[in-house]
Amino acid sequence: MDTEAPKSPSRHAASALSIFITSVSAAIVIGGGFGIVVAAFMLASANLFGLGQTFVWVGLIATALAALWLSLWTFARSLHVERRLKEGLEIDEPKLSIFANLRGS
């Protein structure tokens, strides 16, 4: 099985606009999906176990921050991967840093 990426750049490389739209779409799907599922689970738990309003607000804020970070990371990672593929390079291991993905290192 050949796992090497081609050495020459792709002849049908995507435009910067299509890469941006793809990255934004991936960020919305991943971050939004995570946020909706966790918020629904937290609200259902609060209702089922009779937890207070403070728990709900703290949980919603924590969920929103986690979903925002996940969205930004997904956007940066998608841009990084598309840039590497456009240059004909292999996809590297993901890094947890948003800035490391934006720098391209």
Image: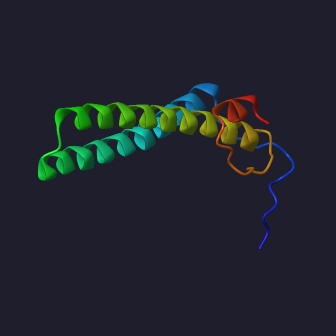
Q: Quadrant of residue 88?
A: top right
Residue depicted at 66% across the width and 37% down the height: 97
Residue depicted at 81% across the width and 42% down the height: 9
Residue 89, x across and y down, in percent? 81, 46
Q: Nearer the viewer, residue 39 or 1?
A: 39
Q: Nearer the viewer, residue 72 or 22?
A: 72
Question: Which image quadrant: the N terminus?
Answer: bottom right
Q: Is residue 11 visible?
A: no
Q: Quadrant of residue 32?
A: top left
Count of numbered circles on the image: 0
Residue depicted at 50% across the width and 38% down the height: 70
Residue 68, x across and y down, in percent? 45, 31
Does 69 appear above or below 17? below
Query: Horizontally, is 92 left or right of 44 in the view?
Result: right
* Farthest-out residue, right: 7
Q: Is residue 1 visible?
A: yes
* Farthest-out residue, top: 17
Q: Nearer the viewer, residue 8 or 70?
A: 70
Query: Horizontally, is 33 left or right of 22 in the view?
Result: left
Query: Horizontally, is 64 left or right of 49 in the view?
Result: right
Q: Quadrant of residue 19?
A: top right
Residue depicted at 63% across the width and 26% down the height: 16
Question: What colour scheme has been applied to the protein in the rendered image?
Answer: rainbow
Residue 33, x across and y down, in percent? 36, 44
Q: Nearer the viewer, residue 24 or 17?
A: 24
Question: Which image quadrant: the C terminus?
Answer: top right
Residue 81, x across and y down, in percent? 68, 42
Query: Horizontally, is 24 left or right of 10 in the view?
Result: left
